[in-house]
Amino acid sequence: MNAIEVRDLRKEFKEITALDDVTLRIKEGEVFGLLGPNGAGKTTLIRVLVGLIKASSGEAKVFNLDVNENIMEIRKRVSLLPQDCQTYEKLTAFENIFYYGQMHGTLSDEDLRKRTNDLIDLIGLRGRENDLTKHFSGGMKRKVLVARAVVMDPDLIFLDEPTTGIDVLGARTVRKLIKELAGMKKTIILTTHDLNEVAELCDRVGILVSGELVAIGTPKELEEKFKQANLEDVFVALSTGEEG
């Protein structure tokens, strides 16, 4: 079954076409890398799929539910970590994660407390879980945000630049969490500019350029199709027309 089905999706903002007849299918349990230069339409596509904006035309379904008709049902199974998200700085790390889970209301307090503690251990913040996040570094805050995004045990997770601002060890921790979620058959949509991260984590990738989905496949398939040595060269060639 497909987690996401998009057909001829178009989004226009006055004279700008942010999505240009995008057609895409993402399978359940897949880690899918959504790539593109800044302004390519990645965030617009995500915002359509979680019901924050409506497409100008076309069709978008999540778990076979139309985003225009069943968005509240969809949101019970979906989580989003935006790139510009912030922690609640007057709450501790534990409270940030636990409170976010309570807002969704899908887990009992007992299960939520256990899951929060498990995530605290997984992101390496044991001993700091009762500290206010306003005292945390940017990287530590980002780890809290990643844990917060998955605490309610969603089936589909959108991670927009999850390792931004994190040091090497922190980024490795986040990648480990993504791998564990993938092992649990969660569907993950990952946007990142780190193409090594994409190669390590993603089953398939889609490349958006100026709102158009110009390529889709496994990293190896794209390298072979476009006759490039690696995914970075594929990305550069499609985004700028330059050979890698």
Image (cartoon, helix red, strand yellow):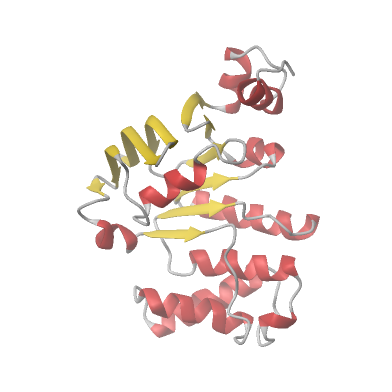
Expressed as whole percent of the image width and height from the top left, the position of residue 1 reads 30, 39
Residue at x-position 65% and y-position 66%: 143
Q: Is residue 30 above or below residue 239?
A: below
**In the rendering, at what x and y percent does residue 69 appear?**
20, 53
Q: In this rendered view, identify the residue nearer to me: 188 or 244.
A: 244
Task: Report which quarter residue 171 is drawn in.
Answer: bottom right
For residue 189, side relative to residue 198 (left or right): left
Residue at the extreme front of the image, as rendered: 15
Is there any visible trace of residue 128 in the rendered image? Answer: no
Residue at image position (26%, 63%) is: 72
Q: Residue furthest left?
A: 69
Q: Is residue 238 in sight in this rendering?
A: yes
Q: Is residue 98 above or below residue 80?
A: below
At horizontal 35% and vertical 35% (from top left) the residue drawn is 10
Q: Work out whether residue 6 or residue 3 is closer to the camera in this orientation and state it.
A: 6
- Quarter holding the C terminus is top right
**Which residue is at the front of the view, 24 or 156?**
24
Examine the rendered structure and indicate whether residue 119 appears above or below residue 78.
below
- Residue 145: name its quadrant: bottom right
Percent x, y of residue 116 = 53, 76
Tell me residue 2's x, y (percent).
33, 39
As drawn, 55 above or below 114: above
- Label count reads 0
